[in-house]
Amino acid sequence: MSLGCPKALVDSERILTRLRSEGYSTAADYQDADVVVVNTCGFIDSARDESLAAIGEALAENGRVIVTGCLGATPDVIMARHAKVLSITGPHQYDAVMNAIHEAVPPPETPFLNLVPARAVKLTPSHYSYLKISEGCNNRCSFCIIPQLRGRLVSRPIADVLNEAEQLVETGTRELLVISQDTSAYGADIRYAKSAWRGREIPARVTELCKALAELGVWVRLHYIYPYPHVDELLQLMQDGRLLPYLDVPFQHASDKVLKAMRRPAAEARTLDRIIAWRKQVPDLTIRSTFIVGFPGETDADFEFLLEWLEAAELDRVGCFRYEAIDGATANALPGAVADEVKEERWHRLMAAQQTISARRLREKTGKVIRVIIDEIGDAGGVGRSTGDAPEIDGKVYVRGGSLAVGQITEARVLRSGPYDLWAEAI
Ligand code: SF4
C-alpha cells in the first residue's frame, strides 16, 4: 500500500522493483498476501491518521504488516496504536525494508537478480514518470519536519539520474516529472560533482540536469523550485522550448513577516517583480504554488496582503493548506495561534479568490492552440493535460476529435474553459 507524495511513490516503486527482481509477486487483495507492506506518510496530522488507519486495516484483514516511509521515522507513534506490526523503518531505507520482508517471507530462489534495473516497476501510467533527483532537505522551514523525517539533502550523482531518465524514455515515458524536496538545491551537498554521461562530464546542477534531460526529446516538468537567482537560467531553457513552461514554486505566503517566521528559503520582497519578468520572458508560462493560511502570527492585515498579492501575481494554479501544528515543528512555539474558525474562513476566501483568477487565466486560452498529452481515452474523446498541468494536482483538458492514443502528444484548439479545466478539439 503506497500512501503520500510522489517522493514516497518512487520509494514504493523501488521496493516493488527489488521485490520483483527477487521473485516475489504482488497480491490483489489482503487475503492472498503473505505480508502487507505499508509505505506511510507522516507529514501532517491528517496524513498520519490516514497512515495509521491503513496500518490498522492491514492488520485486521491480513495480520502480518511491515511499515515503512515517513511515519516510520516516529516508531513510537505507530507502536502506541499498532503494537503488532512486524517491523518499522523510515523513508528510503530500502535495505531495511527488504530485510524485514525476507524475515517475514523468505525470498524464492532466483538466478536473475542482477539483470533487473533499479526501477523496473512503475506505479504511474507508462507515459509519465517521476524522476527523484535527491533525498532530504537542508532548509529549516519552521512548519516542516521533513528534514527530521527524511534527513539532510543527499543528491544522486547526475549520471545515475540521467541513466534512469534514459531508461524510462526507452520504455515509453513521454513526460518526466523532476521531484525532490528542493529541486533548486540539487547537487549542493556533493559540490555539484561531475559524472560522465553520453561521453562527457556533466556537473550535478539543476540547469545542467535540465539541459541534458532536454536531449531525451520528451516533456520535462520541474517541481519544487525556489526563486533563487538561477531560476532565470531555467526560464531561458523554457523560452528555448527545452523545458516545459511550468514553474512549481511553493511560495507559502506573501507577507514578509510571515515568510520570515516560516523561515522560507529565497523569500524576498521583490518576488512580484520577478514573476512579471518571468511572464514577459515566457508568455505561456504556468506558475503553480501552494500557500498556508492561519500560520501563527498571521494577522488580518497579513492575510489581506496575501489576497492582494495573489490578485496581482495572477498565479495559474494554487493549492492552499490550513496551518496544522505538527509534532516536532518549531513553528508550534510561535506566539499568535490562529483560531480554527479563522483559518477556515481564510481558506475559503483564498480558494474563492483564486478560483476567479484561475478561471480568468484559462479563459484567455480560448481559441488558442495548445499541446496536450493524452492520459486516458473516455467515451467522449481523450482526457489529457496541457503543458501547464501536472498529473493529479492541476487541471485536465478534454479533447474531442482525431484518433487519439494514451501517451500521445497532440495539438488542440481550446473551445471553452471552466475554473480549472479546458475543453478542446484535436487538430
Ligand atoms: S524546503 Fe522547507 S518545507 Fe520543503 S522540505 Fe525543506 S524544510 Fe520542508
Image: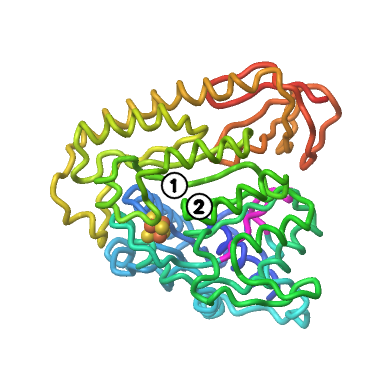
Tell me what residue is drawn at x 48 percent, y 59 percent: 182
Viewer-nearest residue: 214 or 59: 214
In the image, 154: left or right of 178?
Answer: left
Q: Quadrant of residue 203?
A: bottom right
Tell me what residue is drawn at x 37 percent, y 51 percent: 267
**Residue 336 drawn in magenta:** no
User: Is the residue indicated by label 2 positioned so its CB lies within 8 Å of ligand 1?
Assistant: yes
The residue beneath circle 2 is 224
The image position of residue 49, as x and y in percent, is 34, 51
Q: Are marks 2 and 1 in contact (CB under 8 Å)?
A: yes
* CA neighbours of label 2 inside 10 A, class few (<14), some (14 to 19), many (20+): some
The image position of residue 5, as x and y in percent, is 49, 53
Rendered position, 34 above or below 176: below
Report the magenta residues as a range. 122-133
SS of the residue under disc 1: loop
Residue 24 can be seen in this image = no
User: Is the residue indicated by label 1 positioned so its CB lies within 8 Å of ligand 1?
Assistant: yes
The residue beneath circle 1 is 250
| Quadrant (top left/top right/bottom left/bottom right) for the C terminus | top right
Q: Quadrant of residue 88?
A: bottom left
Rendered position, 143 above or below 99: above
Q: Quadrant of ligand 1?
A: bottom left
The image position of residue 350, as x and y in percent, is 35, 29
Tell me what residue is drawn at x 57 percent, y 75 percent: 105
